[in-house]
Image: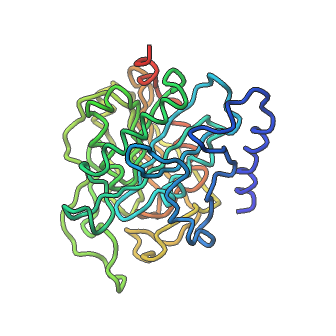
Amino acid sequence: MKKRILNVLAGLLLAVAGNSALAAEVLGVVCETPPPEHCDLDSCGSKLGVRGNVTDPDTGRSYFLDYPCDLQEGEDVVFILNIHGAGSIGNWQRHYFPAMDLKEQYRLVVATPTAEGGISAEGTGVRVWAPAIDDVYLQNITTQVIEAFGAENIKAFWLAGHSQGGITSHRLVCTDFYKDKVDGVLSLSGGRIGTAQLVAAFGPPAADGTPPPARERSMTTGELPTCDFSHIYATGEHEIVAMPDTSPWAEKYSCDSRVHTQVVDTVKGWITDSGRAGYPVWGMAARPGTADVFTYPNCADGRVVADVNRLDKGHTEGLEPKITEQIVQLMVSAKGGKVASGSN
């Protein structure tokens, strides 16, 4: 863990080295490396309840903004809208998919919001992304970040969502607001284009730790999206029956047959659902691990299509550093430019 923290701190040296860096504040945020409210499971405590460091002036709601502290004027960045799952919160998501740790190395701007919607019509109950309550907020964040960094400087824009955040990303990507902006979707246990069947007893355990009742469950409709974007699907091995060995999205872009590699992490992720850890499908303690990475090379139009199967993992163990970096590398390698082309 000390080595990992040192790697995060190394980004601070880059910030000191820049002579003509962007203004010290963007949207009122003084850049920090390590990022603000950073923690691990043993030290997070009340930090997980912090909603962010930027306020959307229209809704009055906060979100986290993390960006390279050595960013130069006019430099290209990859913008990631990092969307949590049902019952979660923004700062947990920042640590589940910790792209913020790589913001200097890969020139990332990461915005991480928190939902206000609920499972009831009144917006109460378990926190979820509800269109009537949350869609305008997400649009406002997107607009605010693009304007702050300059549309011409957005090399690519990705929606990244865990669980219901992935479902939300799939719902949003081809809507009128996003279809000409979003270059890619990263679905973190939030459904695959070309369904990966969930196990029958998918879901959180009961209070006594027993599995939920078995029933048929799905996070996607099976219908192909109607707009163009890259797609990466990552899941825990215990969540699905099996990873499909073909992809209709890869077929759409005439990609080559899939190529298999493995990523081995010797360091655990930052976070897990500690209150319900113990049922392998939902997730155990955060720990090191191995991931199978399946890429479909040479896709038309520079698209990226890939699947990531995290072995012996479930729904909530935070991503480890090397698999996080592998996913980010895939994201930044994909064709972008929708936002920038719209600024001309």
Relative vertical location of residue 200 with respect to residue 58 in this rendering, above or below = below
Q: Residue at x 77, y 31 (%)?
A: 18
Rendered-image quadrant of the C terminus: top left
Viewer-proximal residue, 330 or 261?
A: 330
Image x and y of residue 282, in percent? 38, 68
Q: Quadrant of residue 303?
A: top left
Relative vertical location of residue 85 with respect to residue 167 in this rendering, above or below = below
Left or right: residue 327 compared with residue 124 = right
Q: Residue at x 28, y 59 (%)?
A: 198
Left or right: residue 298 compared with residue 135 = right
What colour scheme has been applied to the protein in the rendered image? Answer: rainbow
Rendered-image quadrant of the N terminus: bottom right
Q: How many marks?
A: 0
Viewer-proximal residue, 284 or 49?
A: 49
Image x and y of residue 332, in percent? 53, 32
Q: Residue furthest bottom?
A: 208
Image x and y of residue 45, in percent? 57, 72
Q: Residue at x 30, y 49 (%)?
A: 167
Q: Residue at x 75, y 38 (%)?
A: 15
Relative vertical location of residue 203 with respect to residue 24 in this rendering, above or below = below
Image x and y of residue 243, in percent? 35, 51
Relative vertical location of residue 172 with respect to residue 115 in this rendering, above or below = above
Q: Quadrant of residue 339?
A: top left
